[in-house]
Image (cartoon, rainbow, N blue to C red):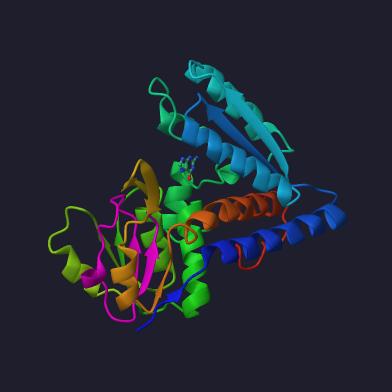
Amino acid sequence: MTAKIIDGKAFAARVRRDVAAHVATMKERHAMTPGLAVVLVGDDPASRVYVKNKHASTVEVGMNSFEHRLPAETHEGDLLALIARLNTDPAVHGILVQLPLPDHIDSALVINAIDPAKDVDGFHISNVGLLGTGQKSMVPCTPLGCLMMLRDHHGSLSGLNAVVVGRSNIVGKPMAQLLLGDSCTVTIAHSRSKDLPTICRGADILVAAVGRPEMITGDFVKKGATVIDVGINRIDAGAGKTRLVGDCHFDSCAAQAGAITPVPGGVGPMTIACLLANTLTACARSHGLSEPEGLTA
Ligand code: GUN
């Protein structure tokens, strides 16, 4: 069997175009521009790249981008004061505090200081609770992107067996909640699960978010299953070079799967696209407008 490659890059480009069209309409009909504030504390090189990309994508879809770069030694109180200002700023509809934060700052305290309606990461405890109880919430971007690709590929997910490998707050747990919301039978497994290959072979949908390079191999995959690889791991490729691989061993999984996301070019590009979608959703909700179709959970 040759697996269909789910092209996350093309899908994300479609989502961004869709968001841009909604932004243009909002500007025209309601004289309103969605705004995203991104806060970066310190100068972690990877975080700087992410923030730069987020800024460029935000501007590209016609939204306002507000960047706040603070030194690594910023006091927690000063960061909380900035968030309080952004919470009440009517031009800001989404707030994202780039993680990880420096060790002297309590990340949970900071995240929970964000107005839940502006929490475009979906990490605030209120949004976690709303998602867990099947209520309208802001949904974490990476699992939302995975859900969009799965819905696009399968149509209905109802009744399918889904196995999520990974139990992080950012991906594994919200992914499981979203799949439950779409009436899948959901198993959450992780690196310590007993007999992981057997559990995974029961999956019609296998989501790998375990953070271990190429840990999921073809013998974990049921023939014809859909494999969503959330992992992005940089490994040594010899001769002083590195390369990006997922949590799935691509060739052996693709030989079994019906459809699979590649790394790079699968889930990765969907994350920023969904951040923009969430900012648009937050803006629409804050003004009592109808939600953009196909861009929410
Ligand atoms: N750092 C790595 N991924 C993320 C993310 O999805 N959101 C935030 N805020 N920080 C991150």
Q: Which residue lies furthest to the bottom in this view?
A: 1
Horizontal arrangement in the rendering, residue 148 relative to residue 279 (left or right): left
Evaluate whether residue 232 shows in this view: no
Taking depth in this image into account, of 284 and 6 the one nearest to the observer is 6
Q: List x then y, in percent, for residue 29.
A: 86, 57
Q: List x then y, in percent, for residue 177.
A: 39, 61
Which SS does the magenta portion mostly show? loop
User: Image height check: is 125 above or below 157?
Assistant: above
User: Image height check: is 5 above or below 213?
Assistant: below
**Residue drawn at point x = 35 percent, y = 40 percent:** 240
**Residue drawn at point x = 59 percent, y = 29 percent:** 83
* Image quadrant assignment for residue 222: bottom left
Q: Is residue 207 magenta?
A: yes
Q: List x then y, in percent, for residue 153.
A: 49, 76
User: Image height check: is 88 above or below 134?
Assistant: above
User: Image height check: is 258 above or below 103?
Assistant: below
Taking depth in this image into account, of 47 and 154 the one nearest to the observer is 47
Magenta stretch: give its range.
205-232
How many numbered marks does the figure carry?
0
Q: List x then y, in percent, for residue 140.
A: 48, 51
**Residue drawn at point x = 70 percent, y = 54 percent:** 284
Q: In which quarter of the image is the N terminus?
A: bottom left
Q: Is residue 105 magenta?
A: no
